């Protein structure tokens, strides 16, 4: 039985929660410059947050299946306790996997400190993840010097690092945020400008004009003050004297908030994370490809984008299991279908004899039945009648020998 070392009490302060760094100048008026030096600053773009949350949530919420062996010797096991809580903090595998996914998607790196190892093999069993925005790695004289959260790590073997987007010769993976800063910055700048338009509107609400006489500046202020006092706090009609006209001014919302530009940049932000993401989130990606069903969109997302992340998650969790065991996230949970499509799939599976009634009932949250642990043909399910001269079948589904007279031997 595998045993892992508990987290040392004296190190608890090391893993204290750190408030994620945000964009410092949130009320800045200079919308031409958006600081994305902190990875979390990009989450101000709605499309970026939605894309990351979509992929991270799907990966972290899929059921975790643990197996041993291959082929006929393949056996499904109960997940080890450390796989159900890889961070050792009591928040579970879902919380830990969400942290890992957002680290990958924002910075291209998942980094943490190993806090539990298998006593016999020394392999890692539990890892406390670190804010990836506060990680640095320098290669010095053939070794790697790590700094996590501003604190140097004396022993590099205690650092757990898994990267995506690897660059030759570099220790850390590439950051999608860093290399798409222009697109993300434009999206944030457009949203801020639209919000500022309604706060500090440069367009007057209307024009009060007089066609009969010239109006001096002092009198214009007096007329404006009287007009505002007359209409403020009341919905009664305003009465204007000779020559006075009032014209309300307005600007189209798509102009004030740059909706067309915002829609385009939002789709670009979502496209950073792969095909299918903007379509699932409802952004116009500029193509004519459509999907007839939710299942079709889910399959497209799974095949072209999500599956590569799920494969990484499989390897990530498998590295924390005892040797000889491995983890597979259950992809079938992603492909939600309608009731009729689901029942048709069950029927085909039962007729093909590669599933049992109780396995189907378990998926539908139904209680098992006594006769449901064997394939249908093995429990006496009716078989089609054999035609004259054809090979018949027994109740167990095996071919029956047919004599010269057509009777079964």
Image (cartoon, rainbow, N blue to C red):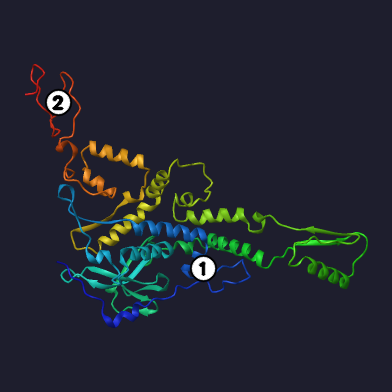
Residue at the right extreme of this rendering: 213
Q: Report the disc number at residue 36.
A: 1
- Numbered label tally: 2
Spatial CA span between label 2 and label 1: 72 Å
From the top left corner, tell me how far across and down residue 305 is, in percent.
Answer: 40, 51
Give left or right: position of 273 versus 2.
Answer: right
Among the 4 quarters of the image, the one containing residue 119: bottom left
The C terminus - image quarter: top left
Among the 4 quarters of the image, the one containing residue 376: top left
From the top left corner, tell me how far across and down residue 86 is, in percent.
Answer: 28, 67
Give left or right: position of 194 versus 279.
Answer: right
At x 44% / y 49%, what residue is drawn? 276
Residue 309 vertical position relative to residue 225 in the rendered view, above or below = above
From the top left corner, tell me how far across and down residue 19 is, in percent.
Answer: 44, 75
State the residue position of label 2. Answer: 392
The residue tagged with tag 2: helix, strand or loop?
loop
Residue at the top extreme of this rendering: 405
Closer-to-camera residue (293/27): 293
């Amino acid at each position: 039985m595998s045993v892992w070392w508990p987290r040392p009490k004296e190190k608890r302060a090391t893993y204290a929660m750190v408030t994620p760094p945000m964009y410092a100048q949130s009320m800045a008026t200079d919308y031409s410059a958006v600081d994305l030096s902190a990875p979390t600053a990009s989450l101000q773009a709605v499309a970026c947050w939605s894309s990351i949350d979509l992929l991270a949530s799907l990966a972290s919420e899929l059921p975790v299946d643990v197996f041993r062996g291959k082929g006929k010797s393949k056996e499904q096991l109960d997940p080890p306790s450390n796989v159900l809580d890889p961070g050792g903090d009591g928040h579970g595998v879902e919380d830990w996997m969400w942290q890992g996914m957002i680290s990958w998607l924002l910075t291209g790196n998942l980094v943490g400190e190993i806090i539990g190892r298998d006593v016999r093999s020394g392999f890692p069993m539990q890892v406390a993840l670190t804010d990836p925005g506060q990680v640095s790695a320098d290669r010095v004289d053939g070794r790697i010097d790590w700094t996590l959260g501003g604190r140097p790590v004396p022993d590099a073997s205690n650092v757990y690092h898994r990267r995506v987007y690897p660059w030759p010769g570099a220790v850390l993976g590439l950051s999608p945020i860093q290399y798409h800063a222009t697109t993300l910055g434009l999206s944030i700048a457009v949203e801020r400008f639209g919000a500022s338009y309604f706060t500090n509107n440069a367009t007057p609400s209307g024009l009060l004009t007089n066609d009969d006489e010239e109006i001096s500046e002092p009198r214009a202020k007096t007329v404006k003050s009287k007009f505002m006092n007359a209409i403020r706090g009341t919905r009664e009609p305003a009465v204007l004297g000779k020559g006075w006209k009032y014209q309300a001014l307005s600007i189209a919302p798509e102009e004030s908030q740059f909706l067309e530009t915002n829609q385009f940049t939002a789709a670009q932000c979502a496209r950073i994370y792969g095909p299918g993401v903007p379509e699932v989130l409802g952004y116009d990606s500029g193509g004519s490809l459509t999907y007839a069903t939710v299942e079709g969109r889910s399959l497209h997302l799974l095949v072209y984008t999500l599956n590569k992340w799920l494969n990484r998650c499989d390897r990530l969790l498998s590295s924390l299991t005892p040797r000889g065991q491995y983890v597979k996230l259950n992809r079938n949970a992603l492909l939600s279908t309608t009731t009729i499509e689901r029942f048709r799939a069950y029927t085909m599976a039962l007729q093909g004899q590669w599933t049992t009634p109780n396995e189907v009932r378990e998926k539908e949250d139904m209680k098992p039945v006594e006769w449901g642990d064997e394939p249908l043909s093995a429990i006496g399910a009716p078989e089609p009648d054999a035609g004259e001269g054809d090979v018949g079948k027994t109740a167990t589904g095996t071919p029956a020998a047919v004599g010269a007279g057509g009777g079964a031997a």
